[in-house]
Amino acid sequence: MFQIAWTSLLLVGAAACGNLENAPFRVGTVHGQLTESDAAVAMVSLVDQPGLSSHVEADGRFTLEGIPAGPAELFIVATADKAARVRVDVLGGQSVQVQPVSPTPAGFFDMRVKTTNGFRLSAAEVSVEGTPFQRLLLDARGRLRVGPLPDGCYTVQVVATGFPPTRAEACAGPGERKELKVDLEVDEALLNLGCEVVGCEEGLVCAPNSKCLECFGNSHCAPGLSCRGNRCEGPGPLCAPCTGDWQCAPGSHCEVLPEGSAACVSRCSAGDTDDDDDAPSGAQSLPDEDCAARCAPGFTCQTGRCLPDAARFAGCHAVRRLDAPCTSNASCHELGLTDGICLRGACTVTCVADSDCPSQRRCGTSPAGLVCLPRT
């Protein structure tokens, strides 16, 4: 019996020694260098194991240790807008030198997270599974730009207090800014609390029935809009903020602009252009200079849309800042009024003729020269 036990112990010891001796051969090391990098943001990690990561030296060199032997993929962030994914075969107990990596333009996800009932988001976070982008905090409106992401497809998870985790699949191409909308279903326990306790997302109000609504009275709507069926309806002027076409005047519609917000805009092309999905098939496009006259004063035809004159306004948000309080010309410039003038404590812009002035303004004489003035 003693001999059998001793033999078993020897076998166990031998197996244990074997495990110790073989352990270093189960992982390997990868060395590489990026042709372009920013040491302040650059990092290299392992796809699906983001905990295995390494910083990048000033010269672009990196070393990633402890990678399980076998096929692997590196997730590389090189600069604020460039990234890469690189496949590599890791040899146990050995070092592998990869070819110099040239990062390419990265993609980004513009997250737009909302609740199905309009409740306010609390402690909402986004994670891109298998990458270093973990538990990124959304802002109060449920928005966040996630990236830079190497070209590829990803699973994005959104978690928030009172809502079950929600996943979405999306792909990011080189240099692509993709809007990713996620709707969260509220838990019954949170629903029972009502909006008096939880609160409503930005743009909604808590109604007496404990539901989040756009409005239940005209006072909840912007000037010029009225509350109809718990919805603020138009007609809103060009560049007015909106959530749907019902808030825009006839001949215009609600559209998300390059500046990131939605506003009422009109078309200045009668044809089927790349930017006009609603135009009749086969219609001929009009050159911008031929249809510019279709735009209202202060607007010019840009890529088929009547948008604020870029020589005077940085976008629709800038048009809405006309007459904003100011202390200097510089304070008007900061509001997006490119050639803004602070006149009698309010912002305006220079002009040559009435056609340069939006929002029912006229081009008139002032101590600062010709500027856009309210019509009297």
Image (cartoon, rainbow, N blue to C red):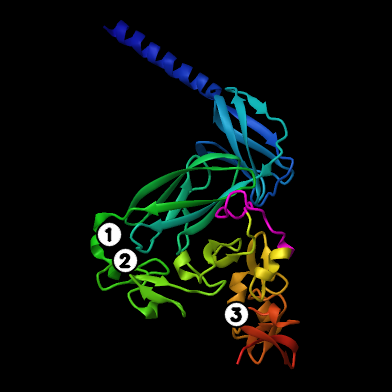
Q: How many marks?
A: 3
The answer to whether residue 199 is seen in the rendering is: no
Secondary element under disc 1, as helix, strand or loop, is: helix
Magenta part of the chain: 272-289
Task: Tell me which corner region of the image, top left, top right, bottom left or bottom right, holds residue 374.
Answer: bottom right
Rendered location of residue 81, percent (x, y): 65, 50
Name the kind of residue labelled 2 in the image: Val
Mark 3: secondary structure: loop
Camera-nearest residue between 3 and 162: 162
SS label for mark 2: helix
Residue 207 visible in image: yes
The residue located at (30%, 10%) in the rendering is: 5
Location of residue 291 (image quadrant): bottom right
For the residues labelled 2 and 3, the Cα–Cα distance comes to 38 Å
Pointer 2 or 1: first along the chain: 1
Q: Residue 272 at what x, y percent from top left?
A: 62, 53
Q: Is residue 339 left or right of residue 204?
A: right
The residue located at (36%, 13%) in the rendering is 9
